[in-house]
Amino acid sequence: MVYIFQMYPNYFGETILLIDNLFWYIIYLLKSVIYCYYMQKLIKLVEGENGVLSIKWTKNLEVGIEDIDNQHKELFKRIDDLFNACNAKLGKQEIGHTLDYLCDYVHTHFQNEEQYQRKYNYPEYPMHAKIHEQFLNEVNDLKSEFDKNGPTLGFIIKFNKKVVDWLINHIGKLDKKFGEFVKAQNK
């Protein structure tokens, strides 16, 4: 066995890395499902065709500003389309389209959202804007990695993890908090 590893070190190294990535991705998905279970009023996981889970928008995520809510809904739809493509073994073909959309989305959406936060004198605007900037940098890093290496399985796993984290932690918590602030201001 050692002899085989010596003959094909890259093949086995890449295979072990792939297995390791899959293991952590499965762990991550399990954590996400458990977390989403507790947040089911916000983010809805539904069983779609062939028993495949898909992520759906719920009204509980609404900020109360139609423009922002529509952008969030479209992001959910695009990520769900990517999940469906991955489940149909078409993730490599779809990831580039989703990444291009995300690159455009973060610029436009963050500008709109921050404009509304300034309009409503949202006290957490500076922190929110920094978080947007961090995610924008992460998306740019993902785009650079994609342009350099293409749609590898490791990249698709990394991309899905980052975006699901964003949906759950940013939209499901921070943007929701901004929405509650806006609703209180409009009373």
Image (tube, grey):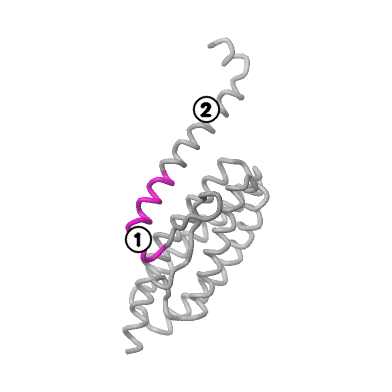
User: Which of the marked residues, 1 or 2, is nearer the chain's N terminus?
Assistant: 2
Q: Is residue 38 magenta?
A: yes
Tag shown at residue 175: none
**Residue 35, located in which quarter of the rendered image?**
bottom left
Depth check, front residue: 69 or 136: 69
In the picture, the quarter occupied by the N terminus is top right
Instruction: For marks 1 and 2, give the CA distance.
Output: 34 Å
In the picture, the quarter occupied by the C terminus is bottom left
Q: Is the residue marked by circle 1 packed among few (<14), some (14-19), or many (20+) residues within 10 Å? A: some
- Left or right: residue 164 versus residue 49 is left
Q: Is the residue marked by circle 2 packed among few (<14), some (14-19), or many (20+) residues within 10 Å? A: few
Depth check, front residue: 115 or 64: 64
Segment colored magenta: 28-43
- Left or right: residue 157 versus residue 149 is left
- Where residue 76 appears, as percent x and y from the top left, is 52, 64
**What residue did someone put label 2 on?**
16
Residue at 56% x, 64% y: name it: 77
Q: Magenta stretch: dominant SS?
A: helix
Mark in the foreground, 1 or 2 = 1
SS state under label 1: loop
Disc 2 marks which amino acid? Answer: Ile
Q: Is residue 97 magenta?
A: no
- Where residue 87 appears, as percent x and y from the top left, is 58, 47
- Where residue 25 appears, as percent x and y from the top left, is 47, 42
**What residue did someone put label 1 on?**
39
Residue at 44% x, 58% y: name it: 45
- Where residue 120 appears, as percent x and y from the top left, is 39, 84
Tell how many labels.
2
Disc 1 marks which amino acid? Answer: Met
